[in-house]
Image (cartoon, coloured by chain):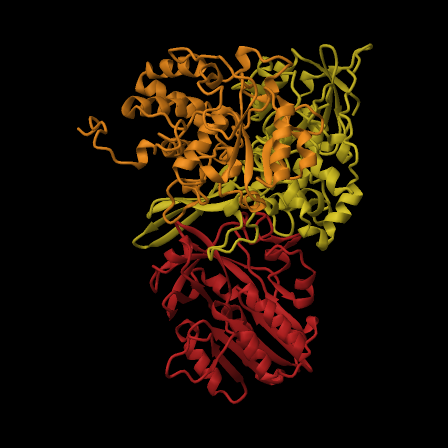
Amino acid sequence: MENELREKAKELLESGEVAVVIGYGFNRKKTRITPVFITKPEETDKLVFNELCVNNLSIYLTRKYRDIQKIGRPAIVAKGCDIKNIVVLITEGQTKREDIHILGVTCSGVVYKQELFKGELKPEIMPSKCHNCDVRNPHVADTVIGEKSDFTPPEEPTGMVFDKIKEIDAMSDSARWDFWNEHFNRCIKCYACRQLCSLCYCERCITEKNMPQWIETSAHPRGNLAWNLIRAMHLAGRCTFCGECERGCPVNIPLNLVNQKLVLTVKNAFGFESGIDENVHPPMIVFSEDDNENFIK
Amino acid sequence: MSNIYIPDLVTIEDIYEETPDIRSFRLVFKDEKLRESFEFKTGQFGLYSAFGLGESTFCIASSPTRKGYIQCTYRKTGRVTNALGELSIGDTMGFRGPYGNHFPIEEWKGKNIVFIAGGIALPPVRSVIWNILDRREDFGDVTIVYGAKTVEDLVYKEELKHWDERPDVKLIQTVDPGGETPEWQGEVGFVPTVLEEAKVPAENTIAVVCGPPIMIKFCLNALGTLGFSDDAVYTTLENKMKCGVGKCGRCNVGDIYICKEGPVYTATEIKAMFDDF
Amino acid sequence: MTDKYISKDGLNGLIASVKASGGRFVAPVLDTRQVVYKEVSSAEEIVDDYILPRNSYKEIAFPQTEILAKYELTRDGVTIDPVEIVARDTVVFGARPCEAASLASLNSVFTWDFIDETFTKRQEKVVVLSLGCVDADDECFCTTVNLSPASTEGSDVALYETENGYIVTPLTDKGTAFVSAHSDSFTDVAKGEEKKELVNPEKVEGVDLTKLGERLAKSPNYDNPEWAELTRKCCGCGACTYSCPTCHCFDIIDEGTAFEGERRKNWDACQFNHFTLHASGHNPRDTQYKRYRNRFMCKFHIYPTKFNSTGCVGCGRCIRVCPVRLDITDLMTAMSS
């Protein structure tokens, strides 16, 4: 599979169809996977794909990375879940389908965090998204690399995130409040969640806007709650549950719970799942006469 | 004071509307002892508080030769400056400073001075101008080249008139092409061009330049053409600052902290700096 | 003072003794699946199988957010009340020898001319008990920056693990005073008590701090396109700076209503776009590589030459925490050539 990937990348660079291949490579010690940007055909053997390739590289397609855009047309190595984000970027007008070459890779799951990998991808070190994955075969791609996966996701979503959501839904309001405050209180406002999210592409985030100051920037409980809730709201109907925010969080805030809860809410209310079809706009940015209005009381 | 980040309270004694978006304040310390003891040097800056919104950095635009008050001039662009724009005479704000280094004016005695400023950059130069005019006999010829985008954008209009009328000051005013009005008597053209055309003699002369980075760059070239050595050219830089005292890590250009080692530099020093501003 | 001994069980006595004298005992504990420095009340909470806690203990002297002053706006004017700096005696147990050097580095910035007492008053009350490392991971690189598990710079008391306890070596006056003040908790070292072997992390090949410093000091290297290439993947979050024991940048902001509020000093990070953004819209560090370059310059040029102190202690936190695995030692290698 890696050979196939390297050959294709080489071909794309040699033909000049793309100027850069955004992919995965090893770090110096060959212990961890890190994003690599290949611009020369002879360097494509640096590309790898394995169960450690957890990063969602679609962040590098956003306008925050002008220097990458300056290199030229990119090809991007993307798992099905990463492609979902690219699809949202297309529906929101952040990139055009024809402006990128998607090197879709078939995937049999990745680790939740690279540090957990001890030579074998056990189900317990995989994130919930992998256990319920419906895009192990890339759904939108220019080239599909790897053998077709015959995995079918379970009827009812399973995994830690879904169990925990049920648990939290059953809590009393005050218990739920305490649960979230306890987690958000650890927030150090490093904004790794935002920076790792390809859908947080605003060049000036609401937390940086100070006329007026919408969110208190201090890492005290009030400011932390405001930040985390506002970010969640800004992702409603857009988040694809790629899990990068939670993976990047240095203080282990269970952000997947917030985001998946919103995914479920939007699915129930609008029957919409983000990241599936690049021609369908997300429900929060379109008006439809069929929209459910039972929230107006 | 045990906490270096706590400002002193100052009262706004007077307000001057310079242009539609530029204002000056004349400020006096609430504390009478401080009013007496407060000292600063030309070129230094301070942090001005609008309570509830934060602090902003401006130079002290008045001259230390005029005691008992400080003056500052700012453009309403951000959160704090907009809030300061809402204040009236008699209102209270915060001030801490003075911070930074200063122009070595005492070393300039007996020399000619040429001032070059663009737009909102006249305030730091104004402190030097008054410092020198208040002891006029100690210095040689004084030339001021001041320009702005339009006539409306010129600050200190009353003072410009005064300097223009003084026989011991040569004032050249200019506005960018298109910025003139039918009544405009001054030059039309960019500051560096006007400066070069003015043919200010470089001999025994110190130049003080202040303005946006692009203007400084071209003025340094123009001064070079006129024969000024880089050591005789002074400027004052600005960068975003939060502490003013070399701690918060924002204003550094390479390894130079503008708030502590600056904001006043010679052209020689500027040219040796890392390209980070 | 000669070496002393304290058993792992005996730590409970020490914790009680510190608490009884009004102090805090901070040690590595497990919190939400990670090891962090936190105040403890019993020895059982302390973990002993860890490389480094996630957070740096700099936050004891330089908290993430603190109130500098409270202000009030009334019809009669403005009042501003500075908040008294509360400094409690604090013991940091199990600090790693690499990061022990960090408070001295921060001190060099916070006392440069103007003295920031919000930091110094708290730092004075911190006693650092560093614990020699008996394990290292792939990210540790203290030996590359001329430190090691045996370093004592910044430690008040050095601890060395034995089978059931620790050999205690007071290093500074503060450390000696601490051991004397809680002498009941320590015993003499029994015969045959042996220190576990310290483990040195492997030195990163190709790093030459002298060459690195010389290269950074030269202005033409500043705009080398290599910077942009090496840091292209940086996502611009503040995880590295907020974990780093020597990062000192902060913001001063007002929070409150139109009538009353607080002026706060908050951590800030040079990795953020708006950190240096002028109100005019101009930004001297307008791309990520310039921001990363600033952080790197700060560690390997500004700290060593301007503040004459250690900029990077090689703790490896920034590598461990980096969500895109940007490895500072890769840049150190590249910039050494």
Task: Tell me what hue chain B is rendered in.
Answer: red
Does B33 sit above or below residue C39?
below
Q: Can you name the residue that lies furthest to the right here? A: C191
Does C230 sit above or below residue A182?
below
User: Which chain is in yellow here?
Assistant: C
Does C155 sit above or below residue B246?
above
Relative side of C171 to B124, left or right: right
Q: Residue at x 61, y 79 (%)?
A: B113
User: Which chain is in orange here?
Assistant: A
Q: Position of residue A282 (x, y in %)?
A: 34, 32
Q: Position of residue B165 (x, y in %)?
A: 46, 87
Does C302 sit above or below residue A180?
below
User: B216 or B257, which is in the foreground?
Assistant: B216
Q: Can you name the residue that lies furthest to the bottom here? A: B167
Q: Position of residue C227 (x, y in %)?
A: 66, 45
Using the rendered image of the protein, determine whether residue B268 is visible from the camera's viewpoint: yes
Relative side of B84 to A25, left or right: left
Instruction: Find residue B14 and report its image quarter.
Output: bottom left
Q: Position of residue B213 (x, y in %)?
A: 56, 63
User: B72 or B190, which is in the foreground?
Assistant: B190
